[in-house]
Image (tube, rainbow, N blue to C red):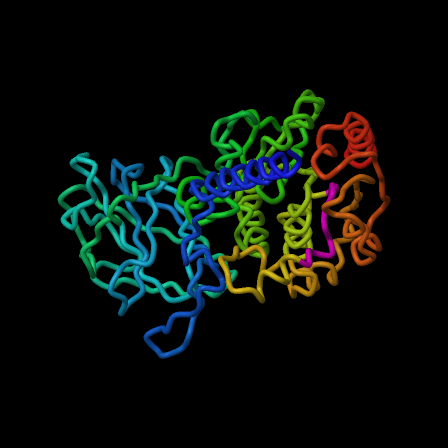
Amino acid sequence: MKKRILFRRILGLAFLLALVLADAAGCRYMSIPAKDDPLAGQTKAKSGETTNAYNSAVIKGRLSGAGPNRESTLVLAYRPGDTDYTEYVIAAANGAFLLYLPEGRYQLFAVTDDNRNGVFESGEVSGQYGTPGNPAEISVREGELVSGVVISLSRPGGRNAALPLEWRPKKGQPLLRQLTHNGQTLKVYHEYFSPENAQTGYWNPSSFMKAFGAHIYLAEDYSPRKIPILFVHGTEGSPHNWMFFCMRLDRSRYQPWFFYYPSGMRLGLAAALLDEELRELHGRYGFTKLAVVAHSVGGLTTRSFLTRYASDKEHAAIRLFVSLATPWSGFSVADASQVLTHKSIPAWLDLGTQSGFISRTLADELPKGIHHYIFYGKNDSLCGDKALDDRAVAGAIKLYSFPCDHSSILADRRVFAQFNKILEKELW
């Protein structure tokens, strides 16, 4: 009888395990394309030099000119000598676009669906980067952001370029459009910030970048009378993570902003994008005070941004940096991910305990005008003592501990009460 009961229990556990594995295998975000996989190897450029095969750089640009259908314009990235286009993006409604690419040299072409039949045809080429008939090349290195790229569109019938190759979307894969742009006003509970999209941003940053890019969003229309509080999420995160902070914030004095980016991309590149988007908003609004608040790995991204860029005059408004549950020392599991042969994620290259990214980020001091406060949870089994790395603690104004774990630190009232006191002290 006992043997029969034991057999049934073992059979039940095996069945449960099979269900879990089947469920995991059925999730789209568990299938990572090779171009998002840093262990997928290298490709040889036309010059014979090897280059990274995964997406690790960004070209940011905009469409200009008299073209009436900018929201129906496809931007193609072509590496001369290749037999196919490296990447595409359909520009946002305001004409902005972000191309997430492997390092290399690229020519950019625009194709506008002027007849609105839903197909981007070779006869609808509407522009290129460079002069007519002479496309210019843009060179990007790993981890680099190239911005300020402008493609002038012609009106229908005024074609001035030709595609080097015929372009067709991959069979069975829908075309993804850039749904958002920098500075857009969206509620914190908007569907774009869903947990499913956040997971896609971690496991498949290329698809996320096609749809959402990496931008700063405003929870309400900008007001010069209110101080912006910029929230930066961590791994598999989104503005949803800041729901309780947003609800409790004094909205008569502060306005919540959110940096939403694919958390699976290289952290240094995410920091460069944060810098670019914040510069753009400062140029638009000219705010004089700003606080940056980051959770988990978002603290590493934010510190990289602050140490690399915040000493510039455009970022003089930044007064305060608050990090919550940040693993400053990295993770040993990320070290193992670079040794074992399996699918990997670009961000894991930066999250190892011996990663050059972490070493550089913690070795550089924060700008003198920015005060850093560290919040951590006593029950945070994910971070543990990584949240108290001496290199980060040395430059902090003060540390605060709370009886929270890695996630509940974002919902605890005591955490927010202390955070609110710091806002009062540092910004007023």
412 to 323, vertically: above or below: above
| Drawn side of residue 144 relative to residue 6, left or right | left
Hey, which quadrant is residue 130 in on the image? bottom left
Q: Where does the image place residue 56, in percent across and percent down from the top left?
A: 48, 59
Tell me where the magenta segment starts and ends, as one range. Answer: 319-332
| Drawn side of residue 151 relative to residue 415, left or right | left
Tell whether position 326 is magenta: yes
Choose between 94 and 8: the one closer to the eye.
8
Tell whether position 189 is magenta: no
Q: Residue at x 22, y 58 (%)?
A: 132
379 to 83, vertically: above or below: above
| Drawn side of residue 423 relative to residue 206, left or right | right
| Drawn side of residue 282 relative to residue 405, left or right | left
Choose between 259 and 194: the one closer to the eye.
194
Q: The C terminus is located in which quarter?
A: top right
Q: The N terminus is located in which quarter?
A: top right
122 to 229, vertically: above or below: below
Q: Where does the image place residue 168, in percent across and percent down from the top left?
A: 21, 50
Q: Residue at x 49, y 62 (%)?
A: 38
Q: Residue at x 35, y 78 (%)?
A: 47
